Amino acid sequence: MEFTNTNPAPQRHLGNVALVVLLHAALVYGLVHGLHSGQLQLADPPPLTVTTVKEPPRPEPPVTKLEPKQTKSPAMPAVDLPTPTSRDTPIDRPSLDPATPHLTEAAGEPAGLGNTAVPLAQTTPLTASAACSNYLEIRDLLADKLPLIAMRADFDTRGIQRFDMVAELTVGAAGEISSPHIIQSSNAYASRAMESSVLSSLRKLKCAGQGSTRSVQVPLTFSLLD
């Protein structure tokens, strides 16, 4: 009969565990105690040494001096200048006699005509009311033409209700009429619209001859308010 015991004793197992726990406790105690007492010291890093290295000077590039090119200017041709006259040289001036008139008489003209006063022709223009007998008739004729011309030229849209014109014509020595034209107007648009009728009507004026050619002015006033 075999009496071999296969199960270990529990006291022996507990002893091994206790031994392991004691070893760990001793190790932890030694570490803590050594750090606390300063036995575990860290090595200081070696000091750093800074060395300044000077860069060698760079060689300066050679400087090339540029010399200006000397250009020869072309020789100027010699010019002979006239010799200036001296201020002491007398200048020939025509002698003027205060008693002698400065006007030269025309060849063949009798002496004494130059001092004769010649009457000038009157250039002040006449008025049609004084020089032309049918001035009022021509004025009324143009007034009758105004409404039709104003309607064609659309005076109402442009706000044209009244404007003035001054015409001028030439009356010959015998009373003939020529060159009628407009010299003044208060409204350029209305003047262009009435110009043809005004000039054709002025040629019908009957003006008395003044013995010479005279200018006659014809003042006209047009109104659509009447």
Image: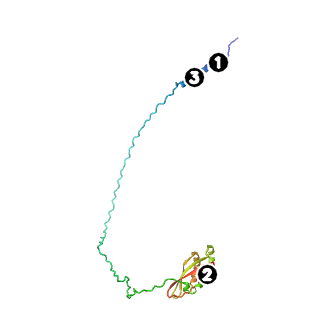
| Residue 29: assigned label | 3
Label 3: state its secondary structure. helix
* Residue drawn at 59 percent across, 84 percent down: 136
* Residue drawn at 61 percent across, 21 percent down: 21
Query: For mark 1, does the 10 Å Cα neighbourhood hold few (<14), some (14 to 19), or many (20 or more) residues?
Result: few
Where residue 104 sits in the image (x, y, percent)?
A: 37, 83
Where residue 170 sits in the image (x, y, percent)?
A: 52, 84
Q: Which residue is mark 1?
A: 14
Q: Which residue is mark 2?
A: 143
Viewer-side residue, 210 vs 74? 210
Query: For mark 3, does the 10 Å Cα neighbourhood hold few (<14), some (14 to 19), or many (20 or more) residues?
Result: few
Q: Quadrant of the C terminus?
A: bottom right
Q: Are marks 1 and 2 in contact (CB under 8 Å)?
A: no
Height in image: 38 above or below 6?
below
Viewer-side residue, 224 vs 142? 224
Amino acid type, callout 1: Leu
Label 2 vs 3, first from the N-terminus = 3
Where residue 152 sits in the image (x, y, percent)?
A: 63, 77
Instruction: Tell me if 65 is positioned left or right of 210 in this view.
Output: left
- Which mark is in front, 1 or 2? 2
Q: Quadrant of the N terminus?
A: top right
Amino acid type, callout 2: Ala
* Marks 1 and 2, how far apart at CA: 152 Å
Q: How is the image coloured?
A: rainbow
Height in image: 173 above or below 67?
below
